[in-house]
Image: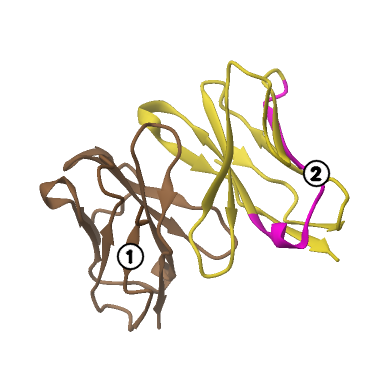
Chain colours: A brown, B yellow
Amino acid sequence: EAGVAQSPRYKIIEKRQSVAFWCNPISGHATLYWYQQILGQGPKLLIQFQNNGVVDDSQLPKDRFSAERLKGVDSTLKIQPAKLEDSAVYLCASSLSSNEQYFGPGTRLTVT
Amino acid sequence: DQQVKQNSPSLSVQEGRISILNCDYTNSMFDYFLWYKKYPAEGPTFLISISSIKDKNEDGRFTVFLNKSAKHLSLHIVPSQPGDSAVYFCAARGGTYKYIFGTGTRLKVLA
């Protein structure tokens, strides 16, 4: 069974630029999560999708972050414009049930 | 407000001995708890979980204990192996199946 795929793995941008991350969940997993993990901290949920509907986006900075999950499969997370404090690893996870989540390898974003 | 806390940022243990990783939480409504292991440059990998209706769950060398009255859970690894060296996160599930993670404990198993 293929795991959660994410791209790119690494990205370096300057502040005020925009960036987009892509996630392909495990086939058949209805729930998809985007997390932000800042160095030294645990993953923090940004947004949770159930199929292509948003379940929770309470911690998504909506003035600069957006996410979509078209057709209930792949998802993209966008930051526009980026700030220095957005430097982090962005993790995508998917789950079949409400229990265990399966994480992708993450995208390490550096904003200079 | 850190609802899930891992107060030990790091832990070193000799190979073959027991590793005990601790996690405290503040929200009594959490109903499911999980432990994840994370190697560098990889995403977290699910390790073991426990429902709030249980106080122990075991899977091979890994056992998770839950003390609801103390709002405390722990992960025991016996015997510890060098390959267990990683960062361990505990996570708790709240409403709408939202997961809240601790800050992690870096375990180093010394050969």
Q: Residue at x 52, y 52 (%)?
A: B45
* Circle 1 Cα neighbour tier, 10 Å, few/some/many (<14 / 14–19 / ≥20): many
Q: Which residue is mark 2?
A: B78
Q: For the residue labelled by badge 2, is the local secondary structure a helix, a strand or a loop?
A: loop
**Label 2 is placed on what type of residue?**
Val
* Residue segment shown in magenta: B70-87
Per the rendering, the mark at residue B7 is none
Q: Going 72% across and 23% down the picture, which residue do you hit?
A: B70
Specify the quadrant of the image occupied by residue A20. bottom left
What residue sits right under mark 1 in the picture? A6
Nearest the viewer among A7 and A11 is: A7
In depth, the one of A2 and B105 nearer the eye is A2
Tell which residue pokes out farthest to the front in this image. A1
Same chain assignment for discs 2 and 1: no
Is B79 one of the magenta-colored residues?
Answer: yes
For the view shown, which residue lies furthest in the left direction?
A: A71
Disc number lying in front (2 or 1):
2
Q: Is residue A16 above or below residue A22?
A: below
Q: In the rendered view, would you say A4 is above or below B90?
A: below
Disc 1 is placed on an element classified as: strand
- How many marks the image carries: the answer is 2
Q: Position of residue A66 (x, y in %)?
A: 21, 57
Q: Position of residue B7 (x, y in %)?
A: 72, 47
Q: Label 1 sits on what residue type?
A: Gln
Locate the C terminus of chain A and report the quarter of the image it occupies: bottom left
Q: CA distance from mark 2 to mark 1?
A: 34 Å
Q: Is residue A50 left or right of residue B2?
A: left
Q: Is residue B94 magenta?
A: no
Q: In which chain is the residue bearing label 2?
A: B
Asked if residue B1 is positioned above or below residue B87 in the image, the reply reads above
**Percent x, y of residue B80:** 80, 52
